[in-house]
Every structure is written in C-alpha cells, then in structure tokens.
Image (spheres, rainbow, N blue to C red):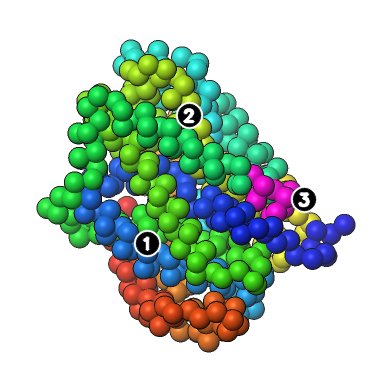
Amino acid sequence: MEANSGKRDQWGSRFGFIMAAAGSAIGLGNIWRFPYITGKYGGGAFVLVYLAFVLVIGASVLLAELAIGRRAKLDAAGAYRKLGGGAWPLVGYLGIFCGSVILSYYAVITGWTLAYMFKSFGGLMEEAAAGRAAESFSTFIANPYLTVICLCAVMAGVVLVVYRGISGGIEKSCKVLMPMLFIILLLLIVRSLTLPGASAGLRFYLMPDLSKLSAEGVLAAFGQGFYSLSLGMGITVTYGSYLSSKEYMPTMTRTIVLLDTMAAFMAGLVIFPAVFAFGIDAGSGPGLTFVTLPAVFAQMPMGAFFSFAFFALLFIAAFTSAIALFEVSVTYAVDELRWTRAKSAIVMGLAITLLGVPSALSGGGHIPEICGKGFLDAVDFITNNAIMPIGGIFTSIFVGWIWTKDALDEVTNRGEFKFKLYRAWLWVCRLVAPVCITAVFITGLKW
Ligand code: PHE
C-alpha cells in the first residue's frame, strides 16, 4: 500500500508531540555547547541574554514554523509552495538539503556518544585515570572502521524509528526517551552538586559577570538560541504538519522553549560543579565532552557508571534530534516524490549514511581538509553559520509580511482562541527577528 495514499498520520497526543518537539530541540548543543559558552561569555549575564532571545525571537520563529506546517499539512518545500508560491519553496528546499547534510555529520557524533557509552565500562576509566583521555579520543576518532560502524548503527536506528511513522515510531520512542533524559540529568546533577568543592563551579557558571559580556557574547547567545531550537531547517514545519488543528500552538511553543532551556541550564549544573570539584580546566567543544569529562568521572567512586549515564544522556539527546532531521527529508520524499514511507526511509537513509562517511573518516585525517578545516568541521560551519540563519530570516519575513493574515487565522485556530501577543509576535517576525538573525549571520561568516 502507498503510505501516502491513506490519511495523513498525526501525533497521537499533546504530550507525545511535545516530547517529539523537545527531542528535536534538545541535542548536543544543549549538553555541551550551552554550558561551555555560558562560562566563556559571563555566566549569569549571558544566561539572561540567552533567555531574552529564546523567549522573544526563538519562540516567535518556532510558532511561525509550526503555523506554516499545520496550515499546509505538507513537507517543508510543499508547504511554502502551497502558502506562498513563487520562489518561496526554495526556503523549504534549503531546509531539506541543509537538514540532510547536518544529519550526515550529526549522526557521526551521535555514533561517538554510542561508542563512549560502552567504552565507559571498557577501559575508558583506566585510560582517563592515567591521563590518557585525550589520546584515547584521538585514537578512537581516527579509527575508520569504528567510526563508520557507529555511523551505520545510528542511521539504522534512525531509519527504523522513522520508518514506523509519526505516531507509531517517532512519538512512541520520544515518549520514553525524553523522560529518561530528564531523569538522567537529575541523577547527574545530584551527583555533581554533592561533590566536595562543587560550589566553585556553580559560582563560575551562574555569577553574572557583566564585564565578560561583550557584543560577541550577545551574538553568541542569539546563535546558540537559534541552533538550540532547531529553527530554520524545516523541522518544525514538518512536525507541525502532523499536528491536529485542535491544538493551541502558542502554549505548546512556550512549553517546548521552556523544556529546551531547562535541559541546557541543567546540563551546566552537571558539568561545571564536577569539573571545578576536581580542578580540571573546562575546555571547549568535543574536548570538554570526550576528554575532560572522562577524566572527571575517572576520579569519582562508581565513575564508570556515571560516565555511562552521561554518554547515554548525550546519546538520547543526539538521537532524538537526528530523528527530527531525518523526518524532514522522509516527509519530503513521501509528499513530493510520492514514495512510500518505507522506500523513503530506506533510500534517504542510505544516501545520508553515504554522505556521512567522509565526516566519519575526517577524524583520522583520511579526508583532505577544506581550507584548513577538517571535513566534519567545515560541513558543520557551512550549515550552521550560513544556511540555517538564511532559513530563519526568510521564515520570519514570510510570516511577518507575506502570509500574515492566514498566519493569525492559523494561530488562533480560525478565530476560536484569542492570541493576545499577536501584535508583538507580528513585529518580531517582521523586524526584530530578521535583523537579529542577520547580525548573527554576518558575524558568523568568519571562517
Ligand atoms: N537543536 C539541536 C541541538 O541543540 C541541534 C540541531 C540543530 C538539530 C538543527 C537539528 C537541526 O543540539
């Protein structure tokens, strides 16, 4: 049977949708990047700027994307074609393309977290205790077989979930995985905060130090907020297209933004107290996650267990974001190419896995660098800094200037509800969001 010949699938419950949308938003960006840049740009002060950005601009763009998706009930490209016509479908195509490219390397890093879950019990603690965590990480990412096998395992998992559909696959798995993620976060927070000397980390993380908050920090907060909510990529348009017309979207938007922010904030409560308690330098990026933290866990009683829990947390966060990225291209294949869901999942899955192989191999220098950056870093840079903001700018312009009347109609469920913040939302979409995201875009282009 053609998967697209029957009734369009729908989220089975409000809770299920919120878990799936939170799963898309909460990802690697929340767990390692948010805490790290918060520390770098002035702790509490940075958190305030970040909060203002996600609550005003992030939430507005998220609501705009949901409304577009739900009204059109189509994939990202089809949605812009149906509602806007002209060149607007390009915004959707850009998202679908960019989402697939992001997934190709995101699945590689997800694979690393999977491997590290098992390495926690397989010698990682001993190596880290002997001061060889960095060496162990570079040996691991340089191993072409291991990284490619991990990539294939992650992609196979993602294909399996998405193949089972919106309610039967994505919703079902996120309803289990997301509560698990918050439970693990809580467990790790308790462990971290009860370590002797934890308070120094808390102070570093949360004491507002306005002198550290520069213009660069403000833009970093904007960029992080945008990335963290997975905007500008067709994901929320796609997820919204499976949402029942009875749901009131502004409240859902608020819940999704709050959950995403809470997860990021909680991750900082895990990382900084632990890192400071053992007097280890809080490095950045993958280094912090795969090198510094194993060294921290190695010094704790039951370190292997906490290390396993931490990498399981990262894995869940990354895996549910990977599912969302993948659904964008699968919905596209089902709606536009009229393939069955099974065929779409398998063909797209194979294509994206192949596309991920150069990223998986780049850790060992098996792939030539692109203008001084490793393949994975280069692809990450181009998609996040160049393409994602363009998607965000055009989404807000579309809702603010072009599709405005119907947007209000959609957000209020055709007049059934009152949307008190309508005027504010409209002007954020018209001016504030495009201007702020353009600023992020321009400053982000430094290679
Ligand atoms: N929001 C995810 C995170 O915080 C990253 C992401 C971006 C996922 C774009 C999908 C699309 O890590």
- Secondary structure found at label 2: helix
Q: Position of residue 239 (x, y in %)?
A: 60, 61
Query: Which residue is under mark 1?
Result: 54
Query: Which residue is under mark 2?
Result: 309
Cβ of mark 1 under 8 A from ligand 1: no
Res. 64 in view: yes
Task: Please report whichever mark, 3 or 1, sits nearer to the chain's N-terminal start.
Answer: 1
- Check residue 168 for magenta coloring: yes
Q: Are marks 3 and 1 in contact (CB under 8 Å)?
A: no
Q: Are marks 1 and 2 in contact (CB under 8 Å)?
A: no
What amino acid is at disc 3? Ala
**Residue positioned 43% across, 25% down in the render:** 306
Q: Nearer the viewer, mark 3 or mark 2?
A: 2
Task: Please report whichever mark, 1 or 2, sits nearer to the chain's N-terminal start.
Answer: 1
Q: Nearer the viewer, mark 3 or mark 1?
A: 1
Q: Position of residue 51 (x, y in %)?
A: 32, 59
- Secondary structure found at label 1: helix
- The answer for how far apart the CA atoms under marks 1 and 2 are is 28 Å
**Which numbered disc covers residue 87?**
none
Query: Which residue is under mark 3?
Result: 342
**Residue positioned 48% across, 29% down in the render:** 309
Q: Which residues are magenta?
A: 164-173
Instruction: Count the marks.
Output: 3
Other-residue count near label 2 (Cα within 10 Å), few / some / many at <14 / 14–19 / ≥20: some
